[in-house]
Image: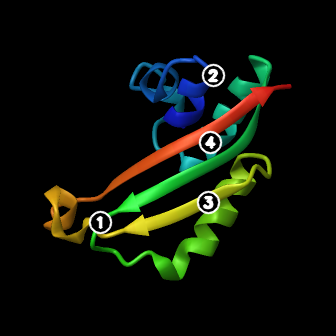
Amino acid sequence: MDALLGAAGLGDIGEHFGTSHPEYAGAHAEVFLARTRELLAEAGFAIGNVSAQFQGNRPRFSGRRTEAERVLSTALGGAPVSVTATTTDGLGFTGRGEGIAVTAIAMIHPR
């Protein structure tokens, strides 16, 4: 969501879905993705594609990669989504198994 909102110059997750928006409390991620797609459309943009990289040792991700890509793509109106994963070879907090991180980039274009 941040990658898409940022690419369109529309702020960030906190601005649109933060604690000042109680209507989103407890909402599933698909709700946020669908609303982000709507915000982009309202601003005159369409999603070209999204790439997200999962960084961490656990959980193992490769077995669910296809499912994640399908669910994310559906929530984004059919935009192509690619999900990759890396263990960071033991480096940093993700490599030590202390947490996970995700980096995403998105391409958008005028409608």
Residue type for callout 2: Ala
Give residue 33's mark.
4
Q: Report how far apart the C-alphas of labels 4 and 2 lie in the structure.
A: 14 Å
Q: Secondary structure at mark 3?
A: strand
Q: Amino acid at mark 3?
A: Ser
- Is residue 88 placed above or below 38 in the rendered structure? below
Kindly indicate the quadrant of the structure image that contains residue 71.
Answer: bottom right
Q: Amino acid at mark 1?
A: Gly
Image quadrant in which the N terminus is located? top right
State which mark lies toward you, 1 or 4: 1
Q: Nearer the viewer, residue 73 or 89?
A: 89
Give the residue pinned by disc 2: 8
| Disc with the residue nearer the chain's start (3 vs 1) | 1
Q: Secondary structure at mark 2?
A: loop
Residue at the disc numbered 1 = 56
The answer to which of marks 3 and 4 sits earlier in the sequence is 4
Going from the N terminus, do you reach mark 1 or mark 4 first? 4
